[in-house]
Image: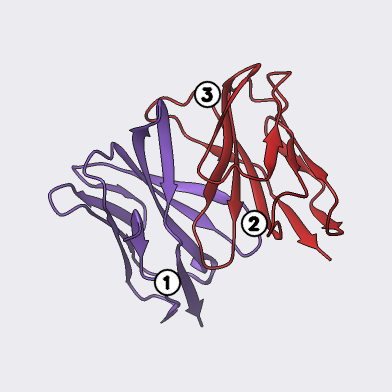
Chain colours: A purple, B red
Amino acid sequence: RKEVEQDPGPFNVPEGATVAFNCTYSNSASQSFFWYRQDCRKEPKLLMSVYSSGNEDGRFTAQLNRASQYISLLIRDSKLSDSATYLCVVMLFSGGYNKLIFGAGTRLAVHP
Amino acid sequence: DGGITQSPKYLFRKEGQNVTLSCEQNLNHDAMYWYRQDPGQGLRLIYYSQIVNDFQKGDIAEGYSVSREKKESFPLTVTSAQKNPTAFYLCASSISTGAGNTIYFGEGSWLTVV
């Protein structure tokens, strides 16, 4: 079983749609959680951190369920510019340092 | 502007050759990392360094080597021992390897073996 699992997609949605990404992680000792966005052939960029209480940044809402080891990202009112791959990232302390583990990503394609 | 600079962006290598990818940061970050990304897969850690003159193997260090002689520089050498080197290589840095520290990436280097 992969340490961080995501649906690979692609998710093809029209502009204005609401889309949800899900992610599960296997290590219950994981400490911090993030969503990164990666455009085609570019580096990943931090979209938002994920907190147990849930957090929102404009059209983006992230939630964490530690009991189920599940992270989600909701995008409301999708824009064409939201088309990208969304990476779920988990941090845990391992081997003497805080290790980042990346999911393979879910690709989103927003069309007119 | 502060940031992480990787070079070259595109590199072609013949089988059996070593190549070195450059990574420079002016963010004054202590921690630096090298990741590899293959199509349809998540990033995998090759090496990381928490401080000058110190570095540690990540999950897939075989066939790679690094050095950290200066705080701002963390070059990666892909040796001929790396059997499948064609990939997208990403250098990153953070203030430290402690919890909650955001990791920033360079623009990446595409290595193709021909």
Instruction: Count residues near mark 2 (Cα–Cα under 10 Å), then give few for <14, some for 14-19, many for 20+.
Output: some
Instruction: Count residues near mark 1 (Cα–Cα under 10 Å), then give few for <14, some for 14-19, many for 20+.
Output: some
State which mark lies toward you, 3 or 1.
1
Say if B72 sits above or below A57 in the image.
above
Which residue does the numbered mark 1 point to in the structure image?
Answer: A8
Q: Is residue A72 left or right of residue A41?
A: left
Marker disc for residue A42: 2
Q: Which chain carries label 2?
A: A
Q: How far apart are marks 3 and 1 (CA)?
A: 31 Å
Label 2 sits on a secondary structure element that is loop
Disc on the earlier residue, 1 or 2: 1
Residue contact at pointers 1 and 2, CB within 8 angstroms: no
Q: What residue type is labelled 2?
A: Lys
Q: How far apart are marks 1 and 2 (CA)?
A: 18 Å
User: Do the residues at pointers 1 and 2 share their chain?
Assistant: yes
Q: What residue type is labelled 3?
A: Ile
Which residue does the numbered mark 3 point to in the structure image?
Answer: B95
The quadrant in which residue B48 appears is: top right
Q: Which amino acid does label 1 sit on?
A: Pro
Label 1 sits on a secondary structure element that is loop
Q: Can residue A14 be seen in this view?
A: no
State which mark lies toward you, 1 or 2.
1
Q: How far apart are marks 2 and 3 (CA)?
A: 22 Å
